[in-house]
Image (cartoon, rainbow, N blue to C red):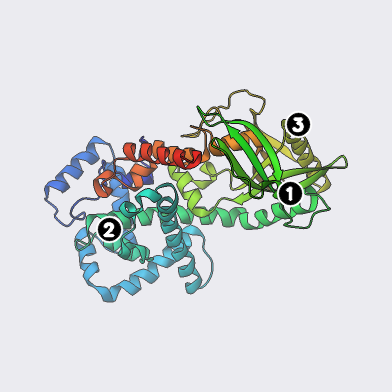
């Protein structure tokens, strides 16, 4: 459950590496045992050049020439406003942010909110059972200025955990800035709106109003051994009313749209999503990649669920025909279809090879959209099956990629991630199976 972070920005967070947050800040005690240990570690890991580049960037950002000058700047509160204004201008130029001073400050501060959202997402969802352990220090939570966060890293008045969290927040803010820059360059907001317009105008049934959904339930019976779906029936609202599932059964709500093919109305459950910034940040870390153009290729996506494999094929054909009606050719890329029973091979950490689905990217209208299409049975396996369920997948990819240990190192948060992972998977299984 680890990752070789190499010379990427993530190596700055490794508590086993030369950039580890120590009991005292860098430069506070030049000839301390910690300083000698850090120097030796830099040489052993061949990261001296990385250290020098990072140190020089810090000095340039704060407009100082040494670590001792940083300590002087911490005390010189009257200089903080000037350094802050300069820093925001530098960041605006780096990330291509246009606008007046207030607009620049607002956008950079939004990177701070994204950084906090990354930690809060993990705290409130995947690691909710361990929320008290990983809660952000109040002083770091309320600080948005990159300069103030950087100064906290070198301020010996702050506890080791607070200084680590200041560094972590700066790194997450940097990733958020890169993602925001790419979203502006690729005009992702406009493309998402265009994608929704395309679906409403050409894909969904003209007999349906925009946003109209029909409520149904999937009543499924599951295998005792692995909780895979053995049988499934579709119930309407009246049929499901008051129904109490027996042991080994699940009643799953789905809200369906419809599309028309050859005069026939075919129901489909659809979840359309634009990946939020905090999810993109986590994906960059999992992939050990700093460039969102390389790591985040699924910004726009649609999850669809139909009754049968035949209807899945019909929907795929309906999509390409709909694109033609919208005056755009549609090509399907990276197609993977395992609904017929063949094994699914994925390079994604934590994913299961026994997850049947149809997956492809559709390129049309200047967009590249990820489609994941299920039958009712494969969708229920995706939610509930042991070792396959999405909840388990979320846990595995955060731990197996080394992200959990990187963001919440044991030395600071006192969590054994191997034990935490096993406990969380067991907890999710109990919740899924209703034990």
The tag earlier along the polypeptide, 1 or 2, is 2
Mark identifier at residue 257: 1
Describe the element under mark 3 as helix, strand or loop.
Answer: helix
Apparent side of residue 311 relative to residue 161 in the rendered image (left or right): right
Residue 71: quadrant of the picture = bottom left
In the image, residue 304 lies at what x, y percent? 67, 42
Measure the alpha-carbon separation of dots 2 and 3. Answer: 55 Å
The tag earlier along the polypeptide, 1 or 3, is 1
Query: How packed is label 3: few (under 14 Cα within 10 Å), some, or many (20 or more)?
Result: few
Q: From the viewer's side, name the closer residue of 95 and 264.
A: 264
Mark identifier at residue 162: 2
Check the image and name the residue furthest to the right. 263
Query: How packed is label 1: few (under 14 Cα within 10 Å), some, or many (20 or more)?
Result: many
In the image, residue 154 lies at what x, y percent? 24, 59
Q: From the viewer's side, name the closer residue of 195 and 190.
A: 195
Residue 64: quadrant of the picture = bottom left
The reply to whether residue 112 is visible in this rendering is: yes
């Amino acid at each position: 459950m680890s990752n070789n972070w190499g010379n990427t920005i993530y190596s700055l967070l490794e508590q086993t590496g030369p950039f580890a947050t120590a009991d005292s800040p860098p430069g506070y005690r030049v000839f301390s045992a910690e300083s000698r240990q850090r120097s030796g570690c830099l040489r052993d890991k061949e990261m001296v050049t990385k250290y020098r580049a990072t140190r020089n960037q810090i000095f340039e950002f704060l407009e100082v020439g040494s670590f001792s000058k940083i300590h002087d700047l911490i005390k010189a509160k009257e200089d903080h406003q000037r350094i802050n204004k300069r820093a925001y201008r530098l960041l605006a130029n780096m990330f291509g942010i246009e606008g007046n001073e207030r607009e620049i400050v607002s956008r950079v501060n939004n990177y701070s909110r994204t950084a906090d959202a990354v930690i809060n997402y993990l705290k409130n969802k995947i690691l909710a059972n361990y929320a008290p352990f990983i809660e952000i220090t109040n002083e770091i939570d309320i600080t948005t200025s990159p300069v103030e966060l950087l100064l906290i890293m070198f301020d010996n008045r702050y506890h080791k955990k607070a200084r680590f969290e200041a560094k972590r927040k700066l790194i997450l803010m940097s990733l958020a800035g890169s993602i925001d820059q790419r979203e502006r360059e690729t005009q992702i907001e406009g493309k998402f709106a265009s994608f929704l317009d395309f679906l409403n105008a050409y894909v969904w049934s003209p007999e349906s109003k925009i946003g109209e959904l029909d409520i149904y339930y999937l009543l499924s019976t599951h295998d005792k051994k692995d909780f895979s779906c053995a049988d499934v029936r579709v119930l309407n609202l009246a049929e499901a009313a008051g129904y109490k599932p027996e042991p080994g059964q699940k009643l799953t709500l789905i809200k369906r749209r419809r599309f028309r093919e050859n005069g026939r109305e075919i129901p489909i459950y659809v979840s359309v999503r634009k990946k939020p910034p905090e999810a993109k940040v986590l994906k960059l870390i999992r992939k050990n990649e700093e460039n969102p153009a390389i790591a985040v290729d699924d910004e726009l996506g649609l999850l669809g669920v139909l009754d049968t494999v035949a209807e899945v094929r019909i929907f795929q054909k309906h999509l390409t025909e709909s694109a033609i009606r919208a005056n755009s050719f549609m090509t399907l890329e990276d197609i993977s279809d395992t609904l017929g029973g063949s094994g699914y091979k994925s390079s994604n950490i934590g994913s299961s090879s026994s997850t049947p689905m149809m997956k492809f990217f559709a390129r049309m209208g200047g967009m590249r959209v990820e489609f994941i299409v299920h039958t009712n049975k494969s969708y229920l396996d995706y939610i509930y099956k042991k070792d396959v369920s999405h909840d388990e997948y979320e846990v595995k990819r955060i731990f197996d990629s080394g992200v959990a240990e990187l963001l919440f190192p044991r030395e600071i948060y006192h969590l054994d991630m191997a034990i935490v992972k096993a406990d969380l998977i067991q907890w999710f299984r109990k919740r899924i199976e209703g034990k």
